[in-house]
Amino acid sequence: MSLFDSLDMRAAILDGNPGGSITINCLPVPQPAHGEMLVKLEACGVCHTDLHVWKGSVRPGSGKPAAQILGHEGIGRVVSTGPGVDNFTAGDRVGIPWLHNTCGTCDECLAGQEAFCQFQRAHGFDVDGGFAEYVIVDAGYAIPVPDGADAGSLAPLMCAGVTAYSAITKAELKPGMRCAIFGCGGLGLYAIQIAVRSGAFVVALDISEDKLELARAVGAQATLIADDTAIGKLESLGKMHACINFAPTAATWPMMIGSIRPRGKIVATAMVSNPVPVNQEWLTGTGVVITGTSVGTRLEMRELLRIHTDNPLSMKIKEITLDGIKDALEDLNSGQIEGRIVIRYDVIS
């Protein structure tokens, strides 16, 4: 019997209806099964995907989420391990990303691209996540994190940061290339910093001048309002080697198609369900590569944490308590948040 068998934890519980109530309840602390660990959380980021799940916009064909507890940007310490766990021990500090686990046997998993596994299970979607004081983690997918770094700055890296890093990696940026980044919310701001560090000339686009100001503050060499004039202005800067979309709208598509250079790369990152037109004759004539990215792999997460440890990525963080989670999701829905929101369990009482 574990010390935690008789303990309760506070958690934000979904009522199961799209956009329904989120209540703070006490639940028994869960117990790790074979290959799992129990983690006591220090912090958990609040992501737009949490908003999508709450509102009911889930992956096509997935049905309703099985999880009652959202959250997939957790930072905490292992307090107990189940049978078969030999890569972590109690006291180790770990990150809890979107991926709880994957099948491990499909072509995507075997190629080290487990983020595209069609049988993946995710924290806060398929299994309970980090909007609670404790969470169960698959030991094979937990991420070792540095002891000294602040949990509030680490938490958003578990999804927003690694998604941005994966997008920049797929763009294959090199020094002197030009990259247009559409959408300057949390993901876009991380991507701007990572792209600038690659040596690329970065153009940031958004409909908000306030967000463009943030983009300039983190290193964007040029900023543009994403309107009907943007294509001409992008062309005057030189056709883009890469266009990366973090804005949750199809309105950026004509701008990307109009500004990408031959053999350039368009990387879709935001969850946009509306169809967009592609002219196949244009594709054959330009050789433009159109691809997408979904969060990131365990290897990309380790690479990102090394980058952040050596030279921390900048991000405006709003810290809240667990009790403020519904208001935080509403603020995300209305576009009122600059940067990222993080629930703190270890600092704020």
Image (tube, rainbow, N blue to C red):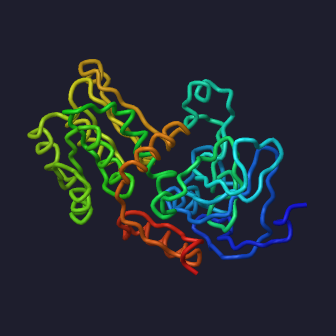
Q: How many marks?
A: 0
Identify which residue is drawn at 43% across, 50% down.
309
**238 lies left or right of 3:** left
Residue furthest toward the bottom? 349
Q: Is residue 292 above or below residue 26?
A: above
In the rendering, at what x and y percent does residue 194 appear?
33, 45
In the rendering, at what x and y percent does residue 285 appear?
24, 19
In the rendering, at what x and y percent does residue 121 appear?
66, 45
Considering depth in this image, is 33 or 246 the residue closer to the camera? 33
Please tell me in which quadrant of the rendered image residue 105 appears: top right
Which quadrant of the figure contains the C terminus? bottom right
Identify which residue is drawn at 61% across, 25% down.
110
In the rendering, at what x and y percent does residue 241 appear?
24, 32
Residue furthest toward the right? 1
Q: Is residue 174 above or below residue 70?
A: above
**300 lies left or right of 216:** right
Which quadrant of the figure contains the N terminus? bottom right
Identify which residue is drawn at 50% across, 75% down.
320
Please tell me in which quadrant of the rendered image residue 336 appears: bottom left
**225 lies left or right of 75:** left
Considering depth in this image, is 91 or 26 the residue closer to the camera? 91
Residue furthest toward the front? 148
Q: Is residue 154 above or below residue 250?
A: below
Identify which residue is drawn at 24% across, 39% down.
179
Q: Is residue 211 above or below residue 230?
A: below
Residue furthest toward the top? 284
